[in-house]
Image: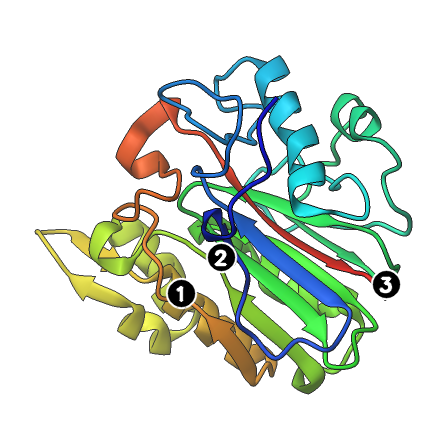
Amino acid sequence: MSSPAPSDAQIVPDWPAPPGVRALVTTRRMPGNSRPPFDAFNLGLRSGEDEGVVSANRELLERACGLPSAPHWLRQVHGGEIVEFASAATRSADAQSGPEPVADAAITRARGVVLAVLTADCLPVLFCADDGSSIGIAHAGWRGLAAGVLEATLAHLDVPPGRVLAWLGPCIGAASYEIDDTVRDVFVDADPRTMHAFTPGRAGHWQCGLEELARRRLARAGVRQVSGGGFDTFTDARFYSYRRDGERSGRFASLIWKDR
């Protein structure tokens, strides 16, 4: 049986969340059951690794991190759908064997409900009301950002945007993320001020700053308190990276819950 995760194998968001709002980000360095090339703590059921191994890692996650319940996992499709969870998952087996809702973001107003998204270059974004009344989480790659997943999450929180705190988790950095004119045009055509998130590269291509795009969309939506950022999953070996590792990349998780 794997031992509990050392403190340096997890990332605890540094943001001014109210008392009772808890969050963490896993890394591949947490002691788990995954073997190369997924070693050691892959949490993605659809990553190509044996599902039994991933399920064992998910069960270990609850124990190692002292979660109040099993995380509510999503079947992420790079879209803008949101799901609300009103109660906690009672058992790991229930959460893993039951159908995962097709969505790229989740919210809750209940205590003990653990929200989760899986990423391996896309941007995880955590949300909470300044009084802790509601929390949310979103999976935001460029398609999700373009689909308005952040704005949709804010709308479902049902809190004035000025009272919402957001934290940007580990994603691929601009220096590591090349996209083409088509992707850039999706954003610049909708909001010319997003051109600052793109740096010219080789002909017809750009380095894309997912964090900058997220900050711009959050600002336009009225969110003034945004923390986090500064990671690069491509260059940081603690994280899985689809761009770096290809189809055999695992997934790490970002989690948020209320314990009071």
Closer to the chain start, of discs 1 and 3, is 3
For mark 2, what is the residue? 146
The spot of residue 22 in percent (x, y) is: 69, 62
As drawn, 85 above or below 108: above
Question: Which of label 2 and label 1 is nearer to you?
Answer: 1
Q: Is residue 119 left or right of residue 97?
A: left
Which quadrant would the N terminus be assigned to in this image? top right
Characterize the local packing of mark 1: few (<14), some (14-19) or many (20 or more) Cα atoms within 10 angstroms.
many
Instruction: Measure the C-alpha gap from mark 2 to mark 1.
Output: 13 Å
As drawn, 99 above or below 136: above
Characterize the local packing of mark 3: few (<14), some (14-19) or many (20 or more) Cα atoms within 10 angstroms.
many
As drawn, 220 above or below 37: below
For mark 3, what is the residue? 109
Closer to the chain start, of discs 2 and 1, is 2
Residue at the image position 81 percent from the left and 48 percent from the top: 68
Instruction: Measure the C-alpha gap from mark 3 to mark 2.
Output: 26 Å
Q: Label 3's element?
A: loop
